[in-house]
Image: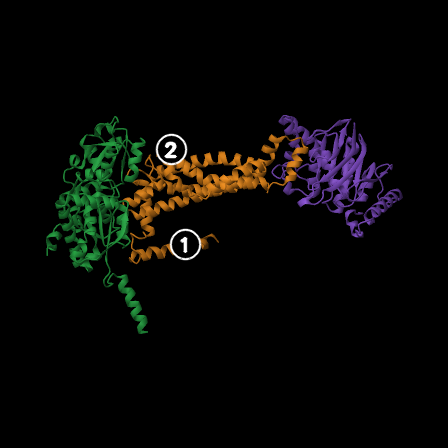
Chain colours: A purple, B green, C orange
Amino acid sequence: MSLVLSGLSKNFPGEGGSEAVAVLEDIRFRVEEGEFISIVGPSGCGKTTLLRIIAGLEEASDGKVLLDGKELPQGSKEVGMVFQEYALFPWRTTLGNIEFGLEVKGINKKKRRAGAMEYIRTFDLNGFERRYPAELSGGMKQRVAIARTLIMDPEVVLMDEPFGALDSQTRNLLQQFLLHIWQKRRDTILFVTHNVDEAVFLSDRIVILSKRPARIVRTFDVDLPRPRDRTGAECNQIRRDILRVLAEETGAGSGETIFSQDCFTIS
Amino acid sequence: MKRLALFLLFHLLLFTGFAYGGPVRIAYLQSDVHQLPCWVAIDKKLFDKEGAKVEIAGIFKAGPELMSGFGAGAIDVGYVGIAPATTAVANRTARIVVLAEVNAEGSSVVVKRDGKVRAIPDLVGKSVAVPGYATVQDFLFRRALSKYGVSPEQVNIIVLKPPEMLGALRTDQIDGFIAWEPYPAKAITTGVGRTIATSRDIWKDHPCCVLAVDEKFLENHPEEARAVVRAHVKAIDFIMKHHEEAVKIAVKYTGMDEASIRLAMTNVKYTPVLSVEGEKEYVEYLTKMKYIKVDDVPAFVARFMRPGFIRDTAK
Amino acid sequence: MKGERLLIPLLLLAIWQGLSLIHVIPSYKLPSPLDILLGLKDLAVVGMPPGYRLHNHILYSLYRVGYGYAAACLIAIPLGLLMGWSPKLLKMIRPIVEVVRPIPPLAWIPLAILWFGLGLRSAAFIIFLGVFFPVLLNTIAGVLSINPILIEAARTLQGRERHIFFKVLFPGAVPSIFVGMRIGIGIGWMTLVAAEFTGVKEGYGLGYMIMTARDIQRPDEIVAGMLVIGMIGLLIDIAIRAAESMSVRWR
């Protein structure tokens, strides 16, 4: 299985007669099966747009998304997505949310329930099956959201800053949790984040995007074995390199100040 | 201080009806050709000639509503059906006295002209509209039924306002109706219906509309009350003697076509003479229907109407 | 304390009864509390008109309202969901709605009678008009208030249009739908009574009962009837709130 983005570009039409806004420019890279890839870049640079195009929620202005050489149809079942805001259905219980995709597929109740309970166990949600999202903590909600996506066994899992809304301790716990799950399942993950430390901790590869219109500036390979020591020398080195590239990106040109640093954080 | 006292006194007088020189407030029923004497008296200024200044305080769609007007103290003199008047007095929602009759008879049972119903017994299982509960027509209809041995439960009696009855009959929502003139006449002249029983057939000379006055008004302005009744008697006299002009006045006040009005007036007997026996029958009927509860019928009737009043008004 | 809450109403009732007893308030203008109670008894036992008893009037009125209400909800809710979802449909139908909505249901009575006759269906139609618009508009608002991200999440979970319609739009709009339904039944109940004033074929109905009490000059029964109407309206509202809170537990 391989996912190829070839020459993806996206323009949004200008408002009220002004020029069109170019958001993505000629994005091209390749994702192999089982890879954990992070996408890092300045705020507003189009990372989310990129994910949405791959997910089929938006159309590219140019270029293609190819899965195993074939174009992905809209609403393809090969791609799953986890949102920063969880996007859990508030009227459904934990079980109800996790089972949602299975219901859509038409799987019978017994099988659905068994499958969902599996995930409840693995995702450490025991006791909360019948709770509603309003009763869950942020960390739990995201676990439910991830379970809801993973239970569909998509070829590619997209994650749009999934831990962005959590406090840093919960965030670390969930990173470990995600790693743990991923190491067992080896899903192919495209992970968008502001948090460089997070990217370094989790990923096989890190793709750095430029300011708008986003191009790929650099790709870092992180060859370190897991679990990684966040404060270890190797991680620190990679982090420094990445931050330098980002600083160049945001410092360059248009007079954006160093405050662009709020778009990438170091935990 | 003095001014405040006068101000209060004036309004007190106004409130208790002693206000000087207020016109007599008259009310009648809309498009009810029974009440032609009222329109004649207004049109020919007969009230003025007898010395009573009048103003029209209300035109009502049905008797019970007019009685509510009495209850609210908004009417001094009303032309109204004897049945709603009796009901209101018996149930103590209005304090009035009946001083003269306005008409006798003047209603009919109407069915579809080309329908299957040819006589009262055919109405078993059918829908028939009456203008309201405790109306003269309601009583007449039940009386007609019992004459033919039909029990009211065998007929679906519903309440409709007479203007709606014509349309309902035409579109077969109902199989028949009973109403005061000119509605039966209108049904006939428009080719929609035909009469199967008139008032005369059901209860000859039955009292229908009466002239009622507010008790307090009678007490405080007896002269004006007499003037009104005198004018009323003259109006009825006029109708007898000047039929053509009376027809024109009826057309003017009902807005209906002349043909219907002429036909309607042949079914109505105008008379100022009250019928005590007739009223007794109404009281018994209303009591039997449980609309009112009157224990001493003669006493009630004596308080309710003053048959001798007309004699006393002769100048 | 519960006792304290009843104190003021009871006091007012006592004053009212007292003023009636000494004839400061004439009984035919406003019956005393005692008169009203006795009137209620008469409505239940003797009936108004005599022979037509209160419980039957209640049942018939409830039936008419239920009929019109059900019809209105069954059409307004799906239509509202569709209109909320499809901006094109919303744009097409909205002008018609905005013109018809302000017309008071009672103004339709003459047309209703011409189209549906004198019986149940014309009364139900009047109710329908009163209930339809609040339910429709609140349903549309409910759909429009759904966070778009939920629809996108459903798409990424392979939801097709019909899944989104039934599994996202409808449940998401339910709280607003209930708001509309509660407003609707309030309007429907009030409209019914007024609609019945113009007469009903079957001879039963609370509005009809009051109109007859007026004809037969029984103000005590008129007020007792009004109280019955108010109480039933209150009970219906409580029932809907209960249903609402049961189904919207997730809030």
First in sequence: mark 1 vs mark 2: 1
Q: Position of residue C62 (x, y in %)?
A: 40, 37
Query: In which quarter of the view is residue B177 placed?
Result: top left
Q: Position of residue B195 (x, y in %)?
A: 21, 32
Tell me the chain of label 1.
C
Residue C11 lies left or right of residue A173; in this view the side is left
Closest to the camera, between mark 1 and mark 2, is 2
Q: Residue at x 50, y 36 (%)?
A: C76
Residue highlighted by disc 1: C9
Asked if marks 1 and 2 fall on the same chain, the answer is: yes
**How many marks on residues?**
2
Query: In which quarter of the view is residue B292 placed?
Result: top left
Label 1 and label 2: CA atoms lie apart by 44 Å
Amino acid type at circle 1 is Pro
Tell me the chain of label 2.
C
**Residue A62, numbered circle:** none
Q: Position of residue C250 (x, y in %)?
A: 59, 40
Mark 1 closeness class: few <14, some 14–19, many ≥20 residues within 10 Å: few
Is residue B81 visible in this depiction of the protein? no
Nearer the observer, A28 or B216: A28
SS label for mark 2 = helix
Amino acid type at circle 2 is Phe
Nearer the observer, C187 or A151: C187
**Residue C116, numbered circle:** 2
Nearer the observer, C78 or A171: C78
Mark 2 closeness class: few <14, some 14–19, many ≥20 residues within 10 Å: some
